[in-house]
Image (tube, rainbow, N blue to C red):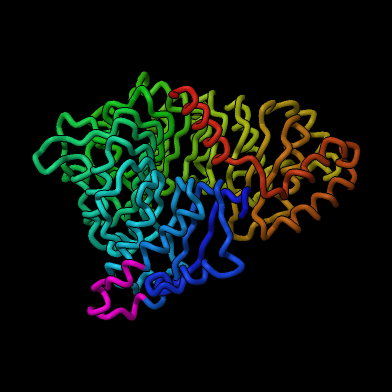
Amino acid sequence: MNLHTKKLRLKLSEDYIYNGLALEALLREPYVNFTSPKARSLDLKLDLSHGSDHSADDIIISSDAEAHIRAFVRHIKQIAPMLQKVFIGSTSDTAVRTHLPSQQFDTLVAQICQSIPDIELRFPSRLIRMDSSLSAIRRLVNDNCEGGSIESMVQLVRHNAQTLQHLDLNLLEGDDITGLIQNADGSYVQYPDLHTLRFRTTRDRDLSRQPVFPGAVPFPCLRNLNFVFTSPIGYDTPFRGNSATLGSLGLYLTQNMIAMLRRNKVFTPTSHPRLQYVRLGWTTNPAEHRSASELEYMKFGLSIGPNALVRQLCMALFHPGLGSVITAIGKHKCIQVLELAHTSMHIMDVIALLKALPLLSHLHSKALLTDPLPNDIPEHEIPAYMIANYSPMGRWFRCWRISNSPNFNYQIAVRWALLLALICPNLDYVAVLAEYRELFMAHMQKMIASSGYRQHVTRLRRLLFGGWSDHIPSVEIAQAKMEATMAAVAN
């Protein structure tokens, strides 16, 4: 017996489950007396390497195999009678790609997921013909990365429309999910308790050719909406009826998406009062990178949720136009967390942002290699120069996370980190990727001991205890805290 285990982890060959060997092993020492009454989560990794060898005859399930599957699942649920969450995945991506569908696999998934409200399946939908009798599901995640029919998954989602709270589907081009919104008789489906919806698609879709569903309001209580690439539902359907509840939004902006949002006036200055977290990504034609198109995309993105506190702008902004970008961002004084992970910035850009955004606490960007500081001032006098001209600023600025970039110069990054720490009284974390961490911290220690910096050692040493940590405050943490707060308010 293990009274403290909260998650049960098993790694097994699927064939051992079908032929009874898995259960036999669990009924022998040292596992025979194992129970986990407090375990709420099962993480089952299946070795599917033999599944690719199944012939057509093997796909017809035998009575013995079904009995072994049911006995195995029954024993697992005796070991952990309080299971609320199940994750089922493969030990090998290669095996998944070559594995054939089978009744055995369908039965195993259906039996394990029976009466489980939180289900995550890391398999392509071609392998899973879901049992629509599964009910009372609150969270469902499915990875459809290898293609195949998604019809049974759509039926399962629709069957659980009244209880689902979290839905995450990975879709391919051509996947028809009309059934999520509309029943066969033409009536609309509504998900009254769904607060989190995430669709991942493979490419942009022509939203003008997607069904319109006039009058449908399928997601009236959404708090978190995320499209990775673009909406597979089309038109403005996912945005209807939830402007008062939506607090977190992730969009991949394309010309199709922007045109649709504008045409339907989805976002206005007074809509979406609770929208606090906005994550936007986009790409433009490489030939237009340095033109006004990039700024136009960004300005439209900033018009979404004008009072949002957390913004992730996942695009590459180029330095010649960065001044106008900072000016545009600076109109949103309430921003506390800003991610420009693909944009290169030097120290004066950071200072300009801190001036424009007085509440900024977290910044994620690349470090530009050029050094804009005066070259007629001796190196040991630069700290005093920065303090005299810029200190204090960024009262709330706590974390600068530096993305990787070609020819990353950790020495320049250290210099800027120390100078920013001298003028920003609460900057405690400057994070770089793991591959540069050791060099970054060693050079920081060396610079702190050098002339011009050593008199500030008490202040600067704080960076030594934060800059290399794996627990740097991040945009994701800020979002999680914000979503927890919104959930508490909603409930």
Q: Residue at x 66, y 27 (%)?
A: 396
Q: Give residue 48's quadrant in the image.
A: bottom left
Which quadrant of the figure contains the C terminus? top left
Task: Report whether 49 appears left or right of 151.
Answer: right
Residue at 41% across, 45% down: 118
What quarter of the picture does the N terminus occupy? bottom right
Q: Residue furthest top?
A: 270
Can residue 220 be seen from the camera position used here? yes
Rendered view: 197 above or below 131: above
Between 241 and 385, the one lying in front of the other is 241
Q: Is 429 a magenta residue?
A: no
Residue at 54% over, 28% down: 335
The region drawn magenta spans 51-67
Judge left or right: residue 47 versus residue 413. Answer: left
Percent coordinates x, y for residue 114 in the rendering: 35, 51
Q: In terms of secondary structure, what is the magenta stretch mainly? A: helix
Percent x, y of residue 253: 35, 42
Q: Nearer the viewer, residue 488 or 447?
A: 488
